[in-house]
Image (cartoon, rainbow, N blue to C red):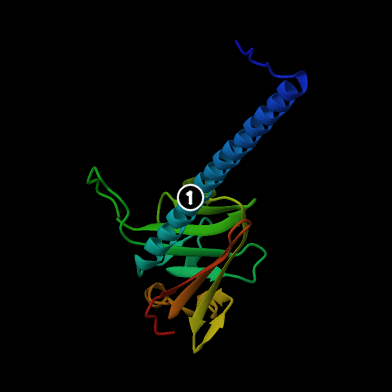
């Protein structure tokens, strides 16, 4: 009977090394696949966050109401105002469609303001149309990792950095309520996705 020859020590070591290499390669491929999946999920969530923020801004602007308001200092403000050139760029507006599920006897309009705060795009909501103090303002972060938030306004066939242009003291409350540009441009720069720009026509006469 012919005796079967066993593996030599060198062959065993080579086999172990090859097996270890294959296992390591498989683990590396699996790890990369998991990492890719996690990155994709993070990107998907980030895109969803951006979409929610842009939808909120779009809805607020589309529901712009012809209603002037008073701030905590008693100053009369137009339905829409903003400033790109200010130290803190902002967009503030009066909008319709405030939710009232309990059908309470209150207005369906509200005042909201967008501004950048410590890398977050913040939406401020006034609890009353004419507020007496900043305690009546609540804020919520819409999207994080924002490098820049700016607004521009289209009027007289050009884009300008602030609205309104005229001194508010020149207007009474009724005239101020209808003061708006032809369009608003919102510019958001994200740290990871870059620049996002959206233009919203308003049909203003200015």
Q: In this view of the protein, which residue sits in the foreground, 202 or 188?
A: 188
* Residue that sits furthest to the left in the current view: 103
Which residue is farthest right?
10
Q: Position of residue 202 (x, y in %)?
A: 39, 76
Q: Quadrant of the C terminus?
A: bottom left
The structure residue drawn at horizontal position 49% and vertical position 54%, both measured from the top left corner, is: 47
| Residue 110 image-quadrant placement | bottom left
What secondary structure is marked by label 1?
A: helix
**Residue 204, position in %: x, y?**
39, 80
Can see residue 81?
A: yes
Packing grade of label 1 (10 A; few <14, some 14-19, many >=20) is: few
> Is residue 2 shown above or below 141?
above
Tell which of 104 and 10 is nearer to you.
Answer: 10
In this rendered view, identify the residue nearer to me: 23 or 87. 23
Q: Residue furthest top?
A: 1
Please give the name of the residue rendered at 40% of the width and 56% of the height, measured from the top-left corner.
129
Residue placed at 63% from the left, 15% from the top? 4
- Where is residue 98 shown, x and y percent of the image? 32, 54
The structure residue drawn at horizontal position 37% and vertical position 62%, both measured from the top left corner, is 59
139 to the left or right of 191: left
Q: Can residue 73 be seen at all in this image of the molecule?
A: no
User: The N terminus lies in which quarter of the figure?
Assistant: top right
The residue lying furthest to the front in this view is: 1
To which residue does mark 1 refer? 44
The x and y percentages for residue 9 are 76, 18
């Amino acid at each position: 009977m012919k005796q079967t020859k066993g593996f030599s020590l060198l062959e065993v070591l080579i086999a172990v090394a090859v097996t270890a290499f294959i296992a390591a390669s498989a683990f590396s491929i699996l790890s990369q696949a998991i990492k890719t999946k996690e990155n994709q999920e993070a990107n998907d969530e980030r895109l969803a966050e951006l979409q929610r923020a842009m939808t909120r801004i779009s809805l607020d602007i589309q529901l712009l109401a012809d209603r002037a308001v008073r701030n905590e200092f008693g100053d009369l403000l137009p339905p829409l105002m903003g400033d790109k050139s200010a130290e803190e760029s902002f967009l503030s507006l009066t909008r319709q469609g405030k939710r009232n599920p309990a059908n309470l006897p209150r207005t369906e309009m509200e005042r909201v303001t967008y501004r950048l705060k410590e890398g977050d795009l913040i939406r401020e909501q006034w609890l009353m149309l004419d507020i007496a103090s900043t305690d009546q303002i609540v804020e919520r972060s819409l999207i994080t990792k924002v490098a820049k938030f700016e607004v521009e306004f289209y009027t007289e066939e050009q884009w300008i950095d602030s609205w309104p242009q005229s001194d508010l003291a020149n207007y009474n409350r009724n005239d101020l309520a209808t003061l708006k540009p032809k369009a608003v441009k919102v510019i958001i720069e994200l740290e990871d996705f870059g620049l996002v720009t959206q233009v919203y026509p308003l049909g203003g006469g200015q």
